[in-house]
Image: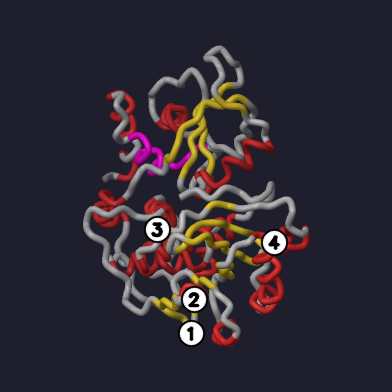
Amino acid sequence: MVLAMLDNRPDTRLDALGEAAEAYVHHAFGLRMGLTSFTDAGLPHFLLDRYRLWEGQLNSEPVLLVAARSQGQSAATEFIKHRELLRRHLGIRLVLLLLESVPAAARRQMVERQIGFLAPGAQLYVPEALLDLRERAPTRLRAANEQFGPTSQVLILASLLGEDLNGANLTKLAERFQVAIMSMSRTLDELEALRLAKPHHVGRQRHLQLVVHDRELWQAVEDRLRSPVRKVRTVRGTLPDHVAPLAGESALAHYTMLSEPRFPHRAIPAARWKHLQQTLELRTGFAFDDDDRAELETWSYDPRALARDAVVDRLSLHLSLRNDPDERVAQAAQQLLEPFGW
């Protein structure tokens, strides 16, 4: 799911936290919230500056998720003061604090005061709806035909591309791939459940320890990997290399003997589409003779995370084009794997 930006300031950490909340409630409890970013010009500016907001449904009732832009120890205390203001102003009964983690003291304080909260991977507490759901079961092993989520896929591809990630703790991994720590924790859960990694702790810190590498890793995960491309748009405007690396047939021409396409193909993360559309003044749906036309792919993860020299990586590119209906493109996509010896 793609969560639109609340304002013009990119915040991948909160994007990932909202995405983790949606996935957690669906996968752990079978509930779909359908979250979308929410803004209301009538809200006091100090609330919009302090919080990121999402609206959705919980058991067919409107719900507002509220995440502090600075998730310090005082986030729960500050939210308790502001919750009633949000409820009165918006007329929404279910207003929940969204947390990356929920320390025991904060949990106790909110439960005692009947303040609803959601901590992906830990608990959903909604006293107004009589919900107090905690995930205690071990991570479920995915069926053989299930696909990886974006965070798991980009970490695996980074390893296959030769990046040494073993021994990195959750904080380092989350910073490297610009995702929430909880999202990265679930990725490690998944890799360990599939026996691609083994549990590894240094003190209280959890670290990545892959036990499968290179050809063996590729063979184990190939069927679970998917194209990162969510949508392709024809746009007109300037797309700098550092914002949108070459992708699609343009990247394929860089790596193989395939001819350059008539217009450049580029990629951006889907979560940043609306922000970049506004800041770069991109327009869509122009005629074929536009000099500054480009084919813009929006990806499920940030293509810059694995790109080199402003070109998307070989493996993501292969996954995006391996089933292309144009036989010459599909064959060139297969050639992308030749340097790896797979």
Dot 3 or dot 4, earlier in sequence = 4
Vertical position of residue 94 compared to residue 222: above or below: below
Q: Which residue is mark 3?
A: 152
- The residue to which callout 4 is attached is 89
- Residue 178: x and y, percent? 55, 57
- Dominant secondary structure (helix, strand or loop) of the stretch shown in magenta: helix
Counting residues from the N terminus, which is met first, the one under dot 2 or under dot 3? 2
The reply to whether residue 239 is visible in this rendering is: yes
- Which color scheme does this rendered protein use? secondary structure
The secondary element bearing badge 4 is classed as: helix
Residue ID for mark 1: 203
Tell me the CA gap for discs 1 and 4: 46 Å
Q: Which element carries disc 1, helix, strand or loop?
A: loop
* Label 1 or label 3, whichever comes before in sequence order: 3
In this rendering, which labeled residue sits more in front, label 1 or label 2? 2
User: Within the image, what quadrant is residue 244 found in?
Assistant: top right
Asked if the magenta segment contains residue 315, the reply would be yes
Q: Left or right of 210: which side holds 55?
A: right
Disc 2, SS:
strand
Q: Which residue is mark 2?
A: 125
Q: Are marks 1 and 3 in contact (CB under 8 Å)?
A: no
Residue depicted at x 54% and y 66%: 172
